C-alpha cells in the first residue's frame, strides 16, 4: 500500500516525514459526529503521542477512504476522545490527506487550549456537544441534542450551532455575536441577553418570559427569518421588529391593541399571525408580500379589504365582531366563522368562496345533530 503512493505528484511532499510517521497498521474504532456512531478505521500513520493520525476506512466522510483522525483525549478535551473529523479532513487520495497532515500546525492552528480567566472557561475553534455556563466560546461548532436547562454568563462569538434545534430553558446574561442557528428555542426565560449580528432561521420565544419586551436586545444587523413571540404577554408592538428581515411573524395570544402602520415596511413578510389579541382596527398590509394573515379572536368590527396584501391567499378573520365582508382577492382559504354576519352575507360569501368556513357566532344547533 505504501509503495503505491505517488510522492512525485506533490512538489513539497515531505516524503521522509511521512515515512518516519508510518506505524504498524492497527484497527481502532473512532467516533463520527455526523452519524453519531463508532466506525472501524485502519491507522497507518501517526506521530507517536500526537493528536493526529492518518487512517483508511470504508466509512469515511463523504465516502472518501482516507482521512485524518483527531485524538481529543491528548488535548485534554472534555467532550470526545477519538473523532473522525469532518468532510474537509477526508479525501480520495492519501496524498491529498497527507498535504493537510503536514500543513496543519495542530493544535495551535485549529484548537486553542482551554483556559481559565476570572473563573470562566474559554474555548476556541472546537467541536462541542455540551454548552456550559460561565464560558466564552469563539469560532466553535456546536452539536447539541439535549435541552440546555440553564445558561448563564456565557458569550458566543462567531459560533455555528448545527442540527435542527437548539432548545434552552433559561438564558440569562449571555451574548450571541455573529453566530449562526437553524432553530433557537427559548422555553422559559430570556433575561439580560443580547443577539448581535446573528443569522437565525427560526427564533422561537413562544410562552417565554422576556424581560425586555421592546426587543432592544436584538441588534439591527441580526437576520431573523421566522420569529415566534406568541404568549409572551406583549402589550405593545416592538418597534425593533420593523428593522428585521422577517418572513414569518407570530404575535398571537398577547395583549396587543394596535399594529403600527409602519408594518408595511416589512417587505419580505409572508405570514403574519395576530390571533387572540385585543385589536380593534384592521392592520394595513396592502403593500407587502403577505400571503397568510390570521387575525381571529380579536375585537374587529369592520373588515377593510383595501388594507389586504394583493398577494393574500390564506385569510382567517374568525371570531371577531364583523357584520359584513366584501373582498376581491383570489383566496385559497377563508375562515369567517364566529362573527356577527347575517345569513344573507354568509350566503353571498359562500357563493364567491365555496370553500369558506362560515359557521355563525350564534348557532344553537352546534352539537345537537
Image (spheres, grey):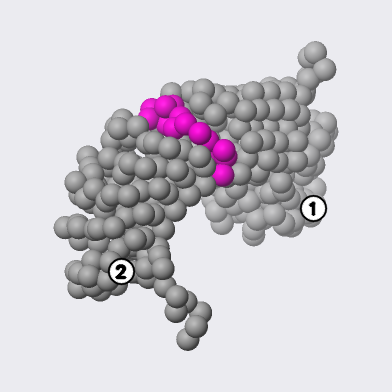
- Badge 1 is on which residue? 28
Residue sticking out furthest to the top: 118
* Residue 17 visible: no
* Residue 41 versus residue 245 in the image, above or below: below
Toward the viewer: 214 or 350? 350
Crowd band around label 2 with a 10 angstrom C-alpha radius: few (<14), some (14–19), many (20+): many
Residue 353 lies in what quarter of the image?
Answer: bottom left
User: x, y percentage for residue 119?
Assistant: 82, 17
Left of 225 or right of it: where is 184? right
Q: Residue at x 28, y 66 (%)?
A: 342
Left of 264 or right of it: where is 50? right
- Considering the numbered disc 1 on the image, is that residue within a helix, a strand or a loop? strand
Magenta residues span 225-243
Left of 176 or right of it: where is 294? left
Residue sticking out furthest to the bottom: 369
* Residue 106 versus residue 209 in the image, above or below: above
Q: Residue at x 78, y 20 (%)?
A: 120
Q: Residue at x 73, y 32 (%)?
A: 151
* Residue 61 versus residue 72 in the image, above or below: below
User: x, y percentage for residue 273?
Assistant: 42, 48
Q: If you read the primary sequence from the N terminus, does the residue marked by circle 1 or circle 2 appear first? A: 1
* Residue 261 visible: yes
Question: How far, Cα to Cα, is label 1 from label 2?
Answer: 64 Å
User: x, y percentage for residue 8?
Assistant: 52, 37
- Badge 2 is on which residue? 356
Amino acid at each position: 500500500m505504501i509503495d503505491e503512493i505517488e510522492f512525485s505528484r506533490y512538489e513539497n511532499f515531505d516524503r521522509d516525514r511521512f515515512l518516519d510517521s508510518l506505524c504498524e497498521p492497527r484497527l481502532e474504532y473512532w467516533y463520527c459526529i455526523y452519524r453519531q456512531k463508532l466506525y472501524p478505521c485502519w491507522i497507518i500513520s501517526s506521530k507517536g503521542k500526537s493528536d493526529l493520525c492518518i487512517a483508511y476506512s470504508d466509512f469515511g466522510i463523504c465516502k472518501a477512504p482516507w482521512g485524518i483522525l483527531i485524538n481529543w483525549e491528548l488535548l485534554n478535551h472534555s467532550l470526545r476522545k477519538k473523532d473522525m473529523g469532518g468532510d474537509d479532513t477526508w479525501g480520495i487520495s492519501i496524498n491529498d490527506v497527507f498535504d493537510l497532515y503536514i500543513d496543519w500546525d495542530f493544535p495551535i492552528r485549529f484548537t486553542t487550549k482551554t483556559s481559565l480567566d476570572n473563573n470562566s472557561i474559554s474555548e476556541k475553534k472546537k467541536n462541542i456537544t455540551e454548552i456550559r455556563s460561565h464560558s466564552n466560546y469563539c469560532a466553535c461548532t456546536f452539536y447539541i441534542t439535549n435541552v440546555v436547562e440553564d445558561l448563564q454568563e456565557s458569550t458566543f462569538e462567531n459560533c455555528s450551532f448545527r442540527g435542527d434545534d437548539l432548545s434552552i430553558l433559561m438564558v440569562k446574561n449571555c451574548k450571541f455575536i455573529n453566530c449562526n442557528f437553524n432553530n433557537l428555542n427559548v422555553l422559559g426565560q430570556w433575561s439580560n441577553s443580547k443577539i448581535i449580528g446573528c443569522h437565525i432561521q427560526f427564533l422561537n420565544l413562544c410562552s417565554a418570559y422576556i424581560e425586555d419586551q421592546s426587543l432592544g436586545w436584538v441588534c439591527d444587523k441580526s437576520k431573523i427569518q421566522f420569529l415566534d413571540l406568541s404568549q409572551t404577554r406583549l402589550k405593545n408592538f416592538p418597534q425593533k421588529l420593523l428593522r428585521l428581515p422577517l418572513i414569518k411573524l407570530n404575535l398571537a395570544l398577547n395583549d396587543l391593541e394596535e399594529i403600527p402602520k409602519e408594518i408595511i415596511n416589512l417587505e419580505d413578510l409572508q405570514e403574519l399571525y395576530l390571533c387572540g389579541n385585543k385589536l380593534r382596527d384592521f392592520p394595513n398590509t396592502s403593500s407587502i408580500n403577505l400571503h397568510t394573515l390570521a387575525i381571529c379572536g380579536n375585537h374587529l368590527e369592520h373588515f377593510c379589504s383595501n388594507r389586504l396584501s394583493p398577494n393574500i391567499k390564506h385569510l382567517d378573520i374568525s371570531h371577531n365582531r364583523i357584520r359584513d365582508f366584501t373582498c376581491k382577492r383570489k383566496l385559497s382559504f377563508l375562515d369567517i366563522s364566529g362573527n356577527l354576519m347575517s345569513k344573507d352575507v354568509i350566503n353571498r360569501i359562500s357563493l364567491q368562496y365555496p370553500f369558506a368556513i362560515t359557521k355563525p357566532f350564534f348557532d344553537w344547533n352546534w352539537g345537537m345533530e
